[in-house]
Image (cartoon, rainbow, N blue to C red):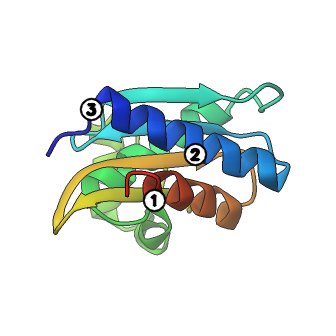
Amino acid sequence: MALNLDGVKKILEAANAKAVEMGVKVSIAVVDARGDLLGLYRMDGARWGTANFSQGKAFASATYGQPSGALSERANLPIMQSALLQSGGRFVFHQGAMPIKEGDVTVGSCGVGGATSQQDEDIAAFGIAALG
């Protein structure tokens, strides 16, 4: 399964609603399995860098098929630094993105930036859960 526009909208809208409920201003990015951007919300009042951070977290999560926070402890390894350089700096190895899976296959990721790392991850997970 590939993510379609309806699925992306569901994720973004649910994640946005969760952020509003939590009282935080974030950016929310959804990428496909290659890490290509499918959709982005930048909430009114979200800090300027949050859009890039949310995309970078989602790119890392989609690439490795893991939550971006699970990658942070390995971020300084030479192989991870090489990947960062080869990607033109697209990876953000910090908590806040969750992979979107169909069975064992990663079909994309949702990344969030702008709140605490745990809040970002919780918002991403809530958005993904809207897919059912």
The quadrant in which the C terminus is found is: bottom left
Which residue does the numbered mark 1 point to in the structure image? 129
Q: How many marks?
A: 3
Residue 102 against residue 59 in the figure, above or below: below
Amino acid at dot 1: Ala
Nearer the observer, 90 or 119: 119
Q: Nearer the viewer, residue 103 or 77?
A: 103
Is residue 77 something one can see in this rendering? Answer: yes
Q: Secondary structure at mark 3?
A: loop
The answer to whether mark 3 and mark 1 are in CB contact below 8 A is no
Within-10-Å neighbours for mark 3: few <14, some 14–19, many 20+: few
Res 95 → quadrant: bottom right
Q: Secondary structure at mark 2?
A: helix
Q: Earlier in the sequence, mark 3 or mark 1?
A: 3
For mark 2, what is the residue?
Answer: 14
Q: Label 2 to label 3, Cα distance in Å?
A: 16 Å
Which residue is the site of mark 3? 4
The kind of residue on which mark 3 rests is: Asn
Which x, y percent locates residue 29?
49, 37
- Say which residue appears at 52% left-offset and 51% top-offset: 127
Mark 3 and mark 1: Cα distance apart in space = 15 Å
Task: Please name the residue shown 45% across and 32% down the image.
Answer: 9
Residue 74 x %, y %: 41, 71
Residue placed most toward the observer, 71 or 129: 129
